[in-house]
Amino acid sequence: MAIQRHVTVERVRLKFAAAHMATLGEELEPLHGHNYLVRARVEGDLTSDRWVIDFSQLKAYVRDVCDHLDHHFLLQRTSPLLDITEHEASWAVRFGDREYVFPKEDVVALPIENTTAELLAEYIAETVLERLREHGHANIRRIAVDVQEMPGQAGGYARDVES
């Protein structure tokens, strides 16, 4: 039986408030927002210091992503259903007869097809994974992130990490 060790961080400032409009089938939700909560877990081998990762390091990596998303409109930049145009100072989003124009400083254009909790979790996990690699955390073998839109309602993403 293989031994697995993990570290989980949640709550302590691992949250963000943001607006979005997810597509559901061929429909677009009305513009609305959530107070999202994020939970991240990494699994891996113990370091020479006998831990997977320092809690404060993992929290900092997750918090940086949350801070980047906080108080913005989350734009699903690669949506096949939205007509999105980037202007010098704004983003224009069209869906059928509906058109929205957002000042650029209020938008985080994400490389995802939809702003579902599952895809937000993937974006956060992959961004945190980049930070883990940049800072030499080669012992991490798996990452998992859950994004809660409201109590009892969360989407998640998990994957193994190549060495």
Image: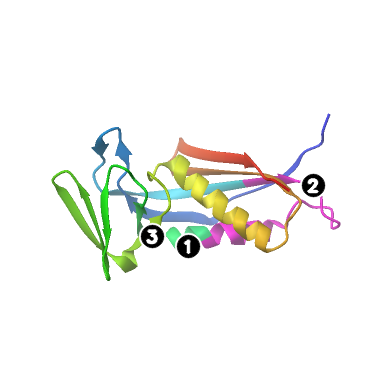
Dot 1 and dot 2 residues touching (CB under 8 Å): no
Which label lies toward us, 1 or 3?
3
Q: For residue 103, which numbered disc appears in the image?
A: none
Q: CA distance from mark 1 to mark 3?
A: 11 Å
Name the spot of residue 149 as percent of width and height, x first. 42, 43
Where is 31 relative to 104, above or below? above
Please give the range of residues in magenta: 41-64
Horizontal relation, residue 103 to residue 113: left or right: left
Residue sitting at the far bottom: 88
Horizontal relation, residue 24 to residue 56: left or right: left
Badge 2: few (under 14), some or many (20 or more) residues near its Cα, within 10 Å? some
Residue located beneath label 1 in the image: 67
User: Tag 3: residue type?
Assistant: Val
Residue located beneath label 2 in the image: 45
Nearer to me, 162 or 107: 162
Give SS at disc 3.
Answer: strand
